[in-house]
Image (cartoon, rainbow, N blue to C red):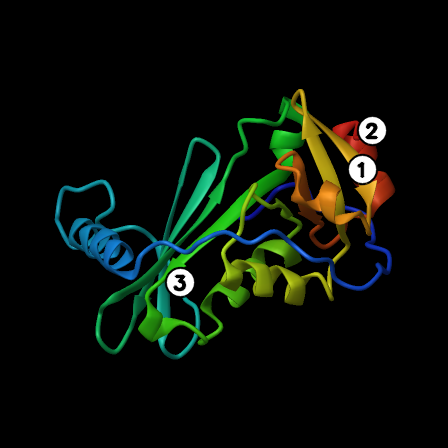
């Protein structure tokens, strides 16, 4: 699995976790339909998703993965049943300039209800962060994503940034509710090896 996005330096201690905005979750029937369609493709010879390389996540799950246009797509299969339990994507952010795009990805996880609370998303996110990938949240988050980011923020440098004109501007580790609710405000999680000064220099963050 490739999560190599420039890890270097030492992360410094950070204040307590921050609050994040919430958004609605994808309807369960739509999620099940989408994952079933992906599973058919994974099992269809000749399809670009067939025969992807994989690795064992734990005793119950295996992950197939592919890279396309700088984005990572991970398909999590339940080993006992063969069911596609979920899909996790590390998206590029079109609103960022080239410097920030090299280092930041926005992770999104879609997992079937029967396979939630198994640590799937946490394990994969932590693997990415531990290998130096840095995360930037989307404009909105589901309650599950909100809870996970709060948990991860206890172990990684984090804070608020504003995204304007493809540049990042540091807002601090605490902001007012009005600033937090602004759609330009995002939450930043830095992977292993990154400190705020080093990251700010690398992306020319204001």
Residue 164, position as x, y percentages in the image: 68, 25
Q: Is residue 29 visible?
A: yes
Residue 90, above or below 85 = above
Quarter of the figure that contains the C terminus:
top right
Sequence-wise first label, 3 or 1: 3
For image coordinates 40% across by 63% down, the residue present is: 55
Q: Which corner quadrant of the image does residue 20 belong to? A: bottom right
* Residues tagged 3 and 1 counted as in contact (Cβ below 8 A): no
For image coordinates 62% across by 32% down, the residue present is: 102
Residue at the disc numbered 3: 55
Camera-near label (3 vs 1) is 1
Sequence-wise first label, 2 or 1: 1
Residue 74, position as x, y percentages in the image: 39, 53
For image coordinates 34% across by 53% down, the residue present is: 53
Real-space CA distance between mark 2 and mark 1, rounded to the nearest whole angstrom: 6 Å
Q: Residue furthest top?
A: 165
For mark 2, does the 10 Å Cα neighbourhood hold few (<14), some (14 to 19), or many (20 or more) residues?
A: few
Q: Which corner quadrant of the image does residue 14 belong to? A: bottom right
Residue at the disc numbered 2: 206
Q: Secondary structure at mark 2?
A: loop
Q: Is residue 124 visible?
A: no
Real-space CA distance between mark 2 and mark 3, rounded to the nearest whole angstrom: 39 Å
Residue at the disc numbered 1: 170
Residue 158, position as x, y percentages in the image: 75, 52
Q: Is residue 30 left or right of residue 109?
A: left
Q: Secondary structure at mark 3?
A: strand
Residue 146's disc number: none
Residue 45, above or below 148 = above
Real-space CA distance between mark 3 and mark 1, rounded to the nearest whole angstrom: 37 Å
């Amino acid at each position: 699995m490739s999560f190599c996005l420039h890890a270097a330096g030492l992360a410094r201690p950070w204040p307590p976790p921050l609050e994040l905005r919430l958004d609605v979750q994808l309807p369960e029937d739509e999620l099940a339909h989408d994952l079933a369609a992906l599973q058919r493709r994974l099992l269809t010879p000749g399809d670009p998703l067939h025969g992807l390389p994989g690795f064992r996540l734990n005793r119950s799950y295996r992950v197939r993965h592919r890279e396309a246009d700088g984005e990572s797509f991970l398909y999590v299969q339940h080993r006992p049943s063969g069911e596609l339990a979920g899909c996790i994507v590390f998206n590029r952010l079109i609103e960022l300039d080239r410097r920030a795009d090299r280092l930041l990805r926005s992770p999104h996880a879609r997992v079937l209800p029967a396979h939630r609370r198994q640590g799937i998303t946490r394990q994969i996110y932590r693997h990415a962060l531990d290998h130096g990938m840095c995360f930037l949240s989307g404009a909105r988050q589901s309650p599950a994503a909100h809870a996970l980011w709060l948990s991860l923020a206890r172990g990684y440098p984090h804070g608020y940034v504003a995204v304007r004109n493809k540049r990042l501007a540091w807002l601090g580790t605490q902001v007012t509710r009005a600033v937090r609710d602004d759609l330009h405000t995002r939450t930043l999680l830095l992977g292993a090896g990154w400190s705020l000064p080093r990251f700010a220099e690398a992306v020319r963050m204001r």
